[in-house]
Image (cartoon, rainbow, N blue to C red):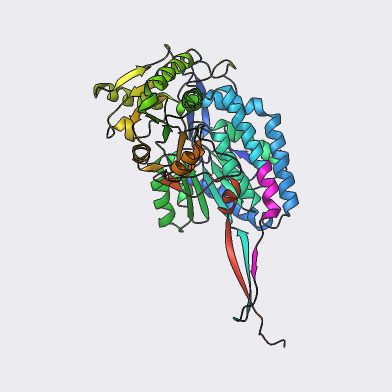
């Protein structure tokens, strides 16, 4: 068995868990054991990481913007230098296809460069004396120790979103990877150190719910950013409120609509609702799992979508191969969860157009699946599945499409397909989602904020909004009428 870095990274050193507790990681491609030695951060380990971050903050906040930027850029360079090693770790832990894993590492590096360039561009505000006798200043200052907890489906994206803006703003960080994909994050501890980050500025932990709970309730953490399930997000919010009222950013689930109008470019809509949806086995919170297609073009669209899904099935396989488009779902638990939804839909009489079963004899592979006209109140239609299962329903009018798209407790993303720019603007303004994408699958672009409405969470990551999450305002009022002596 190959050896991997499985220790915690605290205060610029790799250390074992204080309790000796470990957990196992299995490769979803063939169910082989990757390692049984990943360290579980105990309460004591979390406390040590926070203490190191708290101590480092005193000097890190005073580090010049140019020095911080240089370290961040060096780290981005190191990420690209070690891209193959990081990609391999995400592939064997959670089944990310090589083409997707490489893109995520490249985006991670790009985010560090982006926020390195933003460090010296966060300006304050001033307001002149206006009869009130005071000159007013508004300054933006770092918060202190902040924390990040990542989901397993796009680990590198979350490292970039949660760590880069935080350290750019002058904070120090305690970051926990998912227990399902921990190795690529732990590997990066050595890269942070090589890039020149001082001890305690960035601390990397592994563990499951207990580790995350300790972070959420820690009295010395000023903000926590979490990506994951709605239920866990609620628990983090409760723990934050019951402890020190720390600020919380939550990026949670989704059940996004993809609306295809009768004037859409059908082949383009099919491509994005097939390849765009099935990337990462549709294990994406923004995945457009509810396709709503206008009746006029439904027959043609559905036939072309079926053909595209059947073709994709031939490129499902070992995610370590460059020829593979879609790999397995992350583990046995996720496989069982997705198959439970599919089996439940079958029992309810929902028509399965394509797929609906296991792919292959080993590993956690599920056939790309299309379900036609499930009941709007069924679990498969209303709940997040997080797997390669899409639903197709039809609509008659624009008003009906908007009503159907918004008929969900989630509001992370929505997409629509039309050649009419006026319709695109009109409909996008009425879709209740944090991001609306036109004529493409959902995209989280570097310059714009990403985050949800409703039970998809609150707070934003990405762009300048992501930077501002890690800054707090301080108002300074200067009495212009004070005596000189």
The percent coordinates of residue 361 (x first, y second) are 42, 11
Q: Is residue 369 left or right of residue 173?
A: left
The C terminus lies in which quarter of the figure? bottom right
Which residue is at a point 51% across and 25% down the rendered structure image? 268
Residue 154 versus residue 308 in the image, above or below = below
**Image quadrant of residue 480?**
bottom right
Q: Which residues are magenta?
A: 113-127
Asked if residue 115 is among those painted magenta in the image, a careful observer would answer yes
The percent coordinates of residue 132 (x first, y second) are 59, 81
The percent coordinates of residue 103 (x first, y second) are 61, 29
Residue 458 versus residue 28 in the image, above or below = below
**Image quadrant of residue 363?**
top left
Which residue is at a point 28% across and 23% down the rendered structure image? 350
Q: Is residue 145 left or right of residue 330?
A: right
Q: Is residue 364 visible?
A: no
Q: Is residue 31 visible?
A: yes
Between 425 and 99, the one nearer to me in the picture:
425
Which residue is at a point 50% across and 36% down the rendered structure image? 438
Most frequent secondary structure within the magenta stretch: helix
Residue 161 versus residue 92 in the image, above or below = below
Asked if residue 461 is among those painted magenta in the image, a careful observer would answer no
Between 372 and 156, the one nearer to me in the picture:
372
Which residue is at a point 71% across and 34% down the rendered structure image? 78
Q: Is residue 120 left or right of residue 318?
A: right
Between 160 and 304, the one nearer to me in the picture:
304
């Amino acid at each position: 068995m190959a050896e991997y870095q499985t220790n915690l990274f605290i205060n610029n050193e790799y250390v074992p868990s204080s309790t000796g507790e470990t957990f196992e990681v299995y490769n979803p491609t063939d169910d082989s054991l990757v390692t049984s030695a990943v360290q579980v951060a105990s309460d004591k380990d979390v406390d040590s990481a926070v203490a190191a971050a708290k101590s480092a903050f005193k000097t890190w906040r005073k580090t010049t913007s140019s020095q911080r930027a240089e370290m961040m850029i060096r780290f981005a360079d190191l990420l690209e230098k070690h891209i193959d090693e990081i990609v391999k770790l995400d592939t064997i832990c959670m089944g990310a296809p090589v083409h997707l894993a490489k893109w995520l590492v490249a985006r991670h590096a790009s985010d560090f460069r982006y926020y390195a360039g933003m460090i010296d561009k966060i300006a304050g505000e001033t307001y002149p004396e206006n009869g009130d006798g005071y000159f007013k200043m508004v300054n933006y200052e770092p918060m202190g120790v902040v924390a990040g907890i990542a989901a397993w489906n796009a680990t590198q994206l979350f490292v970039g979103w949660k760590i880069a803006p935080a350290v750019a703003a002058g904070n120090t960080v305690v970051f926990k990877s998912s227990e399902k994909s921990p190795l690529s994050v732990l590997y990066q501890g050595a890269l942070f150190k090589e890039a020149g980050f001082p001890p305690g500025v960035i601390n990397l932990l592994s563990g499951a719910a207990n580790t995350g709970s300790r972070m959420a309730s820690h009295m010395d953490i000023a903000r926590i950013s979490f990506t994951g399930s709605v239920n866990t997000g609620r628990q983090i919010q409760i723990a934050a409120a019951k402890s020190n009222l720390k600020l919380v950013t939550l990026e949670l689930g989704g059940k996004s609509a993809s609306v295809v109008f009768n004037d859409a470019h059908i082949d383009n809509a099919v491509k994005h609702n097939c390849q765009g949806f099935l990337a990462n086995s549709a294990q994406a919170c923004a995945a457009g799992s509810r396709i709503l297609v206008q009746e006029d073009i439904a027959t043609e669209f559905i036939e072309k979508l079926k053909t595209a899904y059947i073709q994709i099935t031939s490129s499902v396989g070992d995610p370590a191969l460059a020829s593979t488009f879609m790999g397995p779902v992350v583990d046995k638990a996720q496989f069982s969860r997705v198959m439970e939804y599919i089996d439940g839909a079958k029992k309810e009489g929902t028509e399965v157009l394509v797929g609906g079963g296991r792919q292959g004899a080993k590993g956690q592979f599920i056939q790309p699946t299309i379900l036609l006209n499930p009941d709007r109140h069924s679990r498969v239609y209303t709940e997040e599945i997080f797997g390669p299962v899409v639903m197709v329903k039809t609509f008659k009018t624009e008003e009906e499409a908007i009503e159907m798209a918004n008929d969900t407790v989630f509001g992370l993303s929505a997409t629509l397909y039309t050649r009419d720019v006026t319709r695109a603007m009109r409909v996008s303004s009425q879709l209740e989602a944090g991001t609306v994408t036109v004529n493409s699958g959902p995209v989280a672009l570097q310059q714009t904020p990403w985050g949800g409405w409703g039970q998809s969470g609150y707070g934003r990551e990405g762009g300048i909004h992501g930077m501002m999450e890690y800054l707090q305002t301080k108002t300074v009022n200067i009495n212009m009428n004070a005596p000189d002596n």
